[in-house]
Image (cartoon, rainbow, N blue to C red):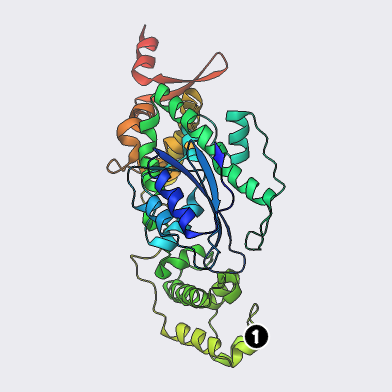
Amino acid sequence: MHVHPLVTDSATLANLCTRMARSPFVCVDTEFMRENTFWPELCLIQVADADEAAAIDPMVPGIDLAPLLALLVANEEVLKVFHAGGQDLEIVFNLTGKTPHPLFDTQVAAMALGQGEQIGYSNLVDGWLGIQIDKGARFTDWARRPLDDRQVDYAIGDVTHLATIFPKMLDRLKRTGRGAWLDQEMERLGDPANYANDPDLAWKRVRIAGRKPEILGRLKALARWRELEARGKNLPRGRIVKDETLADLASHPPRRQADLARVRGLTATWAGNDIGARLMATIEAAQPMTIDEMPPREDRKPGLGKDGALVTDLLKLLLKIRSRDIDVAARLLARSEDLEALAGGQREGLSILSGWRYDQFGRDALDLVEGRLAFAVKGGKLRMTRTEDAADQSSS
């Protein structure tokens, strides 16, 4: 594989993208900083196909990223390959309003091949190629220039190894017949709705003890206000107001702006400055949360009483057994919310009751819930038995 020097001009980047547009796949990774900004600061983009690899410097003044972004989001002929690509997809979405498509995530694919739920990149490379990655440049300040050769080589390694692993992984998925298992997960990962930060939903990130509609209504309004302040100033949310302070303001709202001087987590200047005035206006305008928006109690899931919770535990045990038997990550087979819904009586719209998940797990899960399957201990080992089989044995 030919590795290019750091790409720092538009013409070289455009030519690279033209060549890679003819490839069946391109591996992608990014380096970014987000400690001091609301939006991730894109510092480096690495790409590789089977023949060549390069790192692109997006911080060069005037460099035109349009050919690269077109390759990632507009070219449907090239499969975009990531490893644990959620944050990379977020960056592309922030730049274009779209996500790469079609896409393939090797961390998700590893779940289907029994390599764990969240295998790290270094372990993936070690497991597939027997190569130990030098992690020395992992904590680089990627925004600082110039980047030295060691830093660039480290970054490009994130895609050169991936370009070698991906075809091997794809071949194993085809041989085991598990490639189709990943389609739904890849579509879920690539859903643009995952990356569109809706200010009206920002309150869901904040932990709060109170469940009164008035308190949650204030929290929703305050979280929306903080989101817009942070975006406008391009600062992390916590630099505006920390989560615990936001929850305290929602639970114990100050009566006057002067009272902000006594709120833990705020400085005394909030008692008289403009941002303090905007905070108070937000509190005063907040409306109680509607019933439709109220979150369900964690200890009282809809339709799930004490017996339902016990059934969910049995389903989790079945899931553990089945995922071990077929050597696949449990999370790929079923999610906790699916098990709770099945235990609570839901039968429509569950992914475990259709397609490959039904064949591998859902059919038995349904039989367990409806009394056609049971656990038994035989010879000191836990086994699954059909209830009709048990009845036949007891009568003979």
Q: Where is residue 141 in the image (x, y as percent from the top left)?
A: 67, 60
- Residue at point 55% right, 87% down? 276
Of the 4 image quadrants, the one containing the C terminus is top left
Of residue 119 and residue 249, the one placed in the foreground of this image is 119
Q: Is residue 141 above or below residue 333?
A: below
60 vs 203, left or right, is: right
Residue 343 on image: x %, y %: 38, 40
Residue 334 sits above or below residue 30 on the image: above
Q: Quadrant of the N terminus?
A: top right
Q: Is residue 314 visible?
A: yes
Q: Image quarter for residue 306? A: top left
Percent from the top left, x then y, of residue 84?
52, 45
Secondary structure of the residue carrying numbered label 1: helix
Pick the front one: 46 or 11: 11
Q: Which amino acid does label 1 sit on?
A: Arg
Direction from residue 230 to residue 387 in the image, left or right: left
Q: Is residue 260 above or below residue 177?
A: below
- Callout 1 environment at 10 Å: few (<14), some (14 to 19), or many (20+)? few
In the image: residue 134, left or right of residue 285: right
Q: Identify the residue position indicated by label 1 in the image.
A: 262
* Residue 362 appears in the rendering: no
